[in-house]
Amino acid sequence: MKILAWNVERGKRGAAVLAETTRQYNADIIILTETTKDIDPGLPESIATTELYKGYDGIDYKAGENRTTIWSKYKIDRMVQTYDDYTSICVEVGTPFGKLTVYGIIIGVFGGNGKASERYKSDLRNTDDVMKLPEQLCIAGDLNTTFSGWTYPSSEGRNALNELFKQKNLVCLTCEIENSVNHIALSKSFIEGRNISIETWNHDKKLSDHIGVCVTIN
C-alpha cells in the first residue's frame, strides 16, 4: 500500500496539474494540505476539514479552500474528532494490513518561525489529542518541521515531535528527507517486518512550495 502527503499551496499552480501529479503515484491513502475541492486525486472516499471562508484567520481564502483532506482507496469506517475542525482531521480506514487510524494535520498554519511561531507552538501543544488514538496510527501532513538538513523552525519543535512519536511508538518514515516539512509517521507495529520505500518530488518547488512525499509499504 502507498501513503502520500503533500501541501499543494492552496492550488496556486493549477488544480488540474496538481491533481494529475498526485495521481501519478497511485497512492491508496492521500493527505493533501492547503488544498481545495478542485484538486481531486481520483480516490473514491474522502473527508475534509471545514471549508475556509474569506477573512478566516485574517486570510483572503477563496471558495472551496480547506486545510486538510484525507482521500482513500479503502472504505472510511468512521471519523474521529480532533482539536480543530478547520486544521486537522482523523479517520479510521480498513487496509490490507488491518485497521489504520489516519491523522492529517498542519502544524503551524502560517509557518513555524517569526510572527508565526506562537501559532506553531499552539498547534504543537494541541497534538496531544493524538495520545488518545488507537495503536495502529498514521500521522501525516505539513508538520512545518524538518528532521534532516537545516533546523526549522527550532530544535524545540523537532524534539517535541520526536517525543510524540516515541510516546505513540511511531516511526517517522520521511525524517531523512532533507529540508522537507511534509512527513508520514506510522506505528512500528503496522510496518514491522515490511519493506519500505520512499518517493519524493517537487524539489524545485515549481508545483507548490513543498516537497511531496509518498511511502510504499509491502
Image (tube, rainbow, N blue to C red):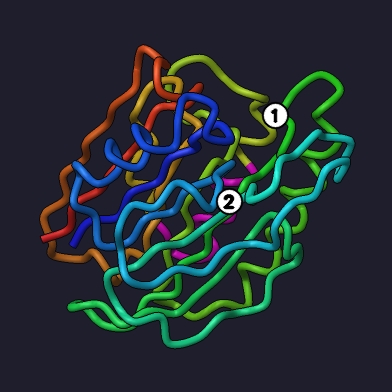
Q: Which mark is residue 163?
A: 2
Inspect the magenta stretch and tell me whether residue 166 lies in it. Answer: yes
- The answer to which of 167 and 36 lies nearer the viewer is 36
Point out residue 209 in the picture as x, y percentages from the top left corner: 50, 22
- The amino acid type of the residue labelled 1 equals Gly
Viewport quadrant of the C terminus: bottom left
- The amino acid type of the residue labelled 2 equals Glu
Residue pictured at 42% horizontal, 59% vertical: 170
Q: Examine the rendered structure and indicate whether residue 164 appears above or below residue 102.
A: above
- SS label for mark 2: helix
Residue pictured at 41% horizontal, 80% vertical: 76
The quadrant where residue 27 appears: bottom left
The quadrant where residue 116 appears: top right
Q: Mark 1 or mark 2: which comes first in sequence?
A: 1
Inspect the magenta stretch and tell me whether residue 153 lies in it. Answer: no
Q: In the drawing, does residue 35 fall left or right of residue 136?
A: right
- SS label for mark 1: loop
Q: In the drawing, does residue 152 fall left or right of residue 183?
A: right
- Which of label 1 and label 2 is nearer to you? 1
Point out residue 145 in the picture as x, y percentages from the top left corner: 57, 33
